[in-house]
Image (cartoon, helix red, strand yellow):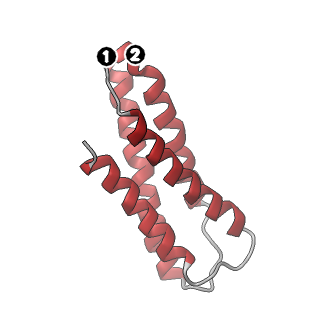
Amino acid sequence: MEFVRLLLVFLHLLGMGMLIAMFFVQRRAGSDAPLNKGWLHGAALQLLTGVALMGLAPLTDQDYNDIKIGVKLLVLVVIAALVAVNLKKRPAAWLAPVLGGLVVLNVGIAVFWT
């Protein structure tokens, strides 16, 4: 079971890395470029692996802070909603920096909230 948990953590971190990479891809493409679908893929990977990790918690004797996880989930839902709403249209110039900031906020919550 520990291998499965570590695999999910690995995939969860890859999803975070994908969101960080999408920020840089978006910045390079310019403010008038449409949003990359990788934003949704990274958010979905983080969501699925996060939910799976929470579901496995009783089996792996992990004790997670439910409020922390709820805040992280809320931030991730905001990221996914902003991307989903703006995916088909030309996004506003402020969207990429806000998405990048939300990703960094989520990483900060994961690391520093104890």
Residue at 49%, 66% (x, y): give it: 22
Q: Disc 2 versus disc 1: distance between alpha carbons?
A: 5 Å
Picture quadrant of residue 103? bottom left
Pointer 1: what residue? 61
Residue at 39%, 21% (x, y): give it: 57
Name the amino acid type tagged 1: Asp
Q: What label sits on residue 34 in the rendered view?
A: none
Residue 24, how many percent across, how many down?
43, 73
Closer to the camera, 103 or 21?
A: 103
Location of the C terminus by quadrant is top left
Residues at circles 2 and 1 in contact by the CB criterion of under 8 Å: yes
Residue 20, how many percent across, how many down?
41, 63
Looking at the rendered structure, the secondary structure element under dot 2 is helix
Closer to the camera, 109 or 49?
A: 109
Residue 108, compared with residue 11, is above or below; it is: below
Pointer 2: what residue? 58
Residue 90, how many percent across, how many down?
70, 80
Looking at the rendered structure, the secondary structure element under dot 1 is loop
Query: Dot 1: within a 10 Å radius of its alpha carbon, few (fewer than 14), some, or many (20 or more) residues?
Result: few
